[in-house]
């Protein structure tokens, strides 16, 4: 369109505005409306559900009926976590049976007492009748009935060495759950055995009496039974080596006076004879990686470190060949295997002691030093004293 | 319909819903003639009592370097899996306290873990919004890590809780911050059913916990930040079977009662409650008065096998053992010797009910039962 030039114009034409882009049209907010409609729909649906529920509530029975159901259900079911003091002899026995009745290697995981040679801190309930706590197959000699296996019903004799509370176990009984309920003192520990509580390997009777020697009663310093007064203490069952504080104790098979390989030892100076790891506590509890069986060098032989050594299944451990040598079963195998067994004695009990006797050199007459009371001892020709004469024995 | 009319209708619907809820609440209140404690007292029930050595910590499982957030037992009760924000799942042998697996997670922010019914695999989930499944029998990769065998991807929010459907290794239910619960088919990695969510009648806030009914695995209950617990049937996704009101704060944890007809909840309002799934009754409230104003939150709960005991972990480090019949605290595991040093974030009872495992922000797990203690690192 030609611009107007100067001069006169015959007609006036409106001037159109210059072209410019148009803004987009405003669309309705459909999404918002739909969303609002959906919410409303949801609410109306909720209204119908609530009305439905209100109708159903009209026919409901009061809560007391359902409270009764809860109570009845709870009372009808037993619970392993609930103390059963009122039923201690029965239900707790069953529980202890379940706890201790399985061989320890596969023992119920919850059985602290049977784990790793039974460093038990459990208090065995008064399961006098229970045959549960007699896991002969398991290491835990702890899991024994409070009633002594000797059959003694004299519970009053069952006293912890550290306190006189009757809940503590008899030194001669195997019940390792001996534990003062009012204190946490370890149950009495027989110095003559590794297990805890005090258990003479040579006898089960009370008082602790080594049948192989006539020291009577065998009283370990760590327990209440008469201190081990084997003179010298040669009782294989008297594990003075581990726990004996008796100065006269001369367990010849072990010179480790501080070796507290009993499963419950917590002496900081305890040293396994096979290692110098000062933190190495009882073999059953030892978690020191450097702890080794003396008879084997397998560091990985965890069984050596966690269970009594006689049960060590490490192939490099020297197996004990003395079948009737029951002492082998109750003392560390390294002891048994390190020393020859005396042939003088035929008695099973006697052989235990023999097993820990050192092989005499016979250069001098050691006969007098032996205190074996085995009647079958042959007297040394050069010695008139009635004592076991290993010089004449065959190994 | 005009927008204005729509908004009016929306407001009216809200008012109607509130009115109906109030009427329902009042009607239910009238039916609550007693609670479990009142009934038990009327029957002369005596309280459970614990001696000092009755329930003790017999194992301490050390190994995590971060807060423990979740744990689960195998049905065989001999293994435990735990999840920690150190980015690892650890599988423990509960008997020996040894670690059998230490699984490095793709996402360290894990919130939940679960053992499969066969014990062959473990599942976990967290802030990555995914549920990862690990097969414990798989070979490790060149870095020594166990690879993820299945990833369940689909949630639009964090995975707060997961549980395998009992007796099935192929189905798992997860709860999420996206307000839904999902039933997954592990073999395909796909969602079978979505419970709740947008335009569905479900939770209206983050879902924090699920518990599947041991007596009827088609039924599960969920707890949410909307203050409600909801009962679901896996065959019906469109709506919850029942909604349980009562809590005044987030419902952090839900657990079925051993009989399968009731379930317990734990909430930010400091209470635990027992509800009946068949009629919706709130049968009991478990609440301990505190002298200070701050009420500790309930973080986790578990029932003993008989239902007589309710274990509840709180944000202040307490772990109350409630006598469920008399609604009294009979023991505080948080204050006994050798207890945790920080909040107990998760609890779990073994399948046979003989022991309780607790996990804490102090990075440890502890196993409680009758007996002595052995600490294993």
Image (cartoon, grey):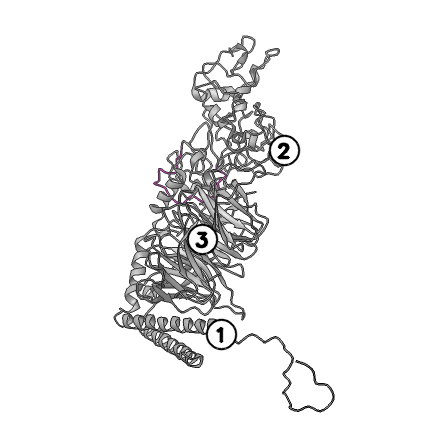
Q: Is residue B238 above or below residue A337?
A: below
Q: Relative to the observer, which residue lies in front, A46 or A11?
A: A11
Residue annotated with mark 2: A277
Can you tell which of label 1 and label 3 is closer to the viewer?
1
Q: CA distance from mark 1 to mark 3?
A: 40 Å
| CB contact under 8 Å: marks 2 and 3 | no
Outermost residue to the left: A59
Residue annotated with mark 1: A29
User: Does the rendering let one see residue B208?
Assistant: yes
Image coordinates for residue A383, horizontal then vertical, percent: 55, 11
Check chain identity for marks 1 and 2: say if they share one: yes
Q: Chain of mark 3?
A: B
Image coordinates for residue B123, horizontal then vertical, percent: 47, 48
Residue annotated with mark 3: B162
> The residue tagged with tag 3: helix, strand or loop?
strand
Q: CA distance from mark 1 to mark 2?
A: 80 Å
User: Which stretch did the figure color magenta?
Assistant: A118-135
Q: CA distance from mark 2 to mark 3?
A: 46 Å
Q: Relative to the observer, which residue lies in front, B119 or A180?
A: B119
* Residue at position x 34%, y 40% in the image: A129
Outermost residue to the top: A381
Image coordinates for residue A358, horizontal then vertical, percent: 56, 18
> The residue tagged with tag 2: helix, strand or loop?
loop
Q: Is residue A367 above or below residue B191?
A: above
Check chain identity for marks 1 and 3: say if they share one: no
Q: Residues within 10 Å of mark 1 (few under 14, many from 20)?
A: few
Image coordinates for residue A302, horizontal then vertical, percent: 54, 31
Q: Quadrant of residue B195?
A: bottom left
Magenta segment, prevailing SS (helix, strand or loop)? loop
> The residue tagged with tag 1: helix, strand or loop?
loop
Q: Chain of mark 1?
A: A
């Amino acid at each position: 369109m030609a611009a107007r030039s100067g001069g006169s114009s015959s007609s006036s034409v409106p001037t159109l505005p210059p072209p410019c882009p148009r803004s987009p049209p405003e669309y309705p907010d459909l999404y918002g409306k739909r969303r609002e409609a959906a919410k409303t729909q949801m609410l109306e649906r909720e209204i119908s559900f609530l009305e439905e529920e209100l109708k159903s509530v009209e026919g409901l029975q009061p809560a007391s009926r359902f409270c009764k159901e809860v109570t009845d259900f709870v009372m009808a079911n037993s619970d392993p976590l609930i103390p059963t003091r009122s039923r201690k002899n029965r239900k707790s026995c069953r529980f202890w049976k379940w706890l201790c009745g399985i061989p320890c290697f596969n023992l119920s995981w919850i059985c602290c007492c049977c784990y790793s040679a039974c460093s038990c801190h459990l208090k065995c309930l008064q399961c006098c009748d229970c045959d549960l706590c007699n896991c002969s197959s398991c290491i835990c000699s702890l899991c024994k009935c409070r009633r002594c296996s000797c059959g003694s019903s004299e519970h009053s004799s069952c006293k912890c060495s550290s306190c006189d509370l009757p809940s503590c176990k008899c030194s001669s009984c195997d019940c390792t759950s001996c534990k003062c309920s009012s204190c946490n003192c370890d149950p009495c520990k027989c110095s003559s055995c590794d297990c805890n509580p005090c258990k003479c390997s040579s006898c089960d009777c009370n008082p602790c009496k080594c049948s192989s020697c006539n020291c009577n009663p065998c009283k370990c310093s760590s327990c209440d039974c008469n201190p081990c007064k084997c003179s010298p203490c040669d009782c294989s069952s008297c594990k003075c080596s581990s726990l004996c504080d008796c100065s006269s104790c001369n367990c010849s098979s072990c010179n480790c006076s501080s070796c507290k390989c009993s499963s419950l030892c917590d002496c900081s100076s305890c040293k396994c004879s096979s290692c110098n790891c000062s933190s190495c506590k009882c073999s059953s509890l030892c978690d020191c990686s450097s702890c080794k069986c003396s008879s084997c060098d397998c560091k990985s032989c965890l069984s050596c470190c966690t269970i009594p050594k006689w049960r060590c299944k490490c192939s490099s451990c020297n197996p004990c060949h003395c079948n009737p040598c029951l002492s082998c079963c109750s003392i560390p195998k390294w002891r048994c295997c390190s020393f020859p067994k005396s042939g003088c004695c035929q008695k099973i009990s006697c052989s235990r002691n023999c097993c820990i006797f050192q092989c005499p050199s016979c250069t001098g007459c050691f006969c007098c030093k032996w205190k074996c009371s085995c009647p079958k001892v042959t007297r040394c020709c050069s010695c008139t004293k009635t004592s076991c004469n290993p010089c004449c024995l065959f190994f | 319909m005009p927008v204005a009319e729509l908004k009016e209708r929306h407001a009216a619907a809200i008012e109607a819903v509130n009115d109906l809820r109030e009427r329902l609440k009042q009607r239910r209140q009238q039916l609550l003639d007693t609670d479990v404690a009142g009934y038990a007292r009327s029957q002369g029930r005596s309280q459970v009592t614990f001696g000092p050595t009755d329930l003790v910590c017999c194992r301490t499982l050390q190994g995590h370097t971060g807060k423990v957030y979740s744990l689960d037992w195998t049905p065989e009760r001999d293994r435990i899996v735990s999840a920690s924000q150190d980015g690892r799942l650890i599988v423990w042998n509960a008997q020996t306290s040894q670690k059998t697996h230490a699984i490095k997670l793709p996402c360290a922010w894990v919130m939940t873990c679960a053992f499969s019914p066969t014990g062959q695999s473990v599942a976990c989930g967290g802030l990555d919004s995914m549920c990862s499944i690990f097969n414990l029998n798989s070979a490790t990769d060149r870095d020594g890590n166990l690879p993820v065998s299945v990833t369940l991807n689909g949630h639009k929010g964090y995975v707060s809780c997961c549980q395998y459907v009992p007796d099935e290794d192929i189905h798992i239910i997860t709860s999420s911050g996206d307000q839904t619960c999902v039933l997954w088919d592990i073999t395909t990695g796909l969602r079978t059913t979505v419970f709740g969510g947008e335009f569905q009648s479900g939770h209206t806030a983050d879902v924090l916990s699920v518990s599947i009914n041991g007596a009827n695995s088609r039924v599960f209950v969920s707890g949410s930040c909307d203050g409600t617990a909801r009962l679901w049937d896996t065959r019906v996704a469109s709506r919850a079977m029942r909604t349980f009101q009562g809590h005044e704060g987030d419902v952090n944890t839900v657990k079925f009662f051993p009989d399968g007809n009731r379930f317990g909840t734990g909430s930010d309002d400091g209470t635990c409650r027992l509800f009946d799934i068949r009629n919706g009754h709130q049968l009991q409230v478990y609440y301990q008065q505190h002298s200070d104003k701050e009420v500790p939150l309930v973080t986790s709960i578990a029932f003993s096998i008989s239902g007589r005991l309710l274990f509840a972990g709180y944000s202040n480090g307490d772990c109350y053992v409630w006598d469920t019949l008399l609604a009294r605290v009979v023991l505080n595991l948080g204050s006994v010797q050798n207890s945790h040093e920080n909040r107990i974030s998760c609890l779990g009872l073994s399948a046979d009910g003989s022991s309780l495992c607790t996990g804490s922000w102090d990075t440890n797990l502890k196993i409680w039962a009758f007996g002595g203690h052995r600490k294993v690192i």
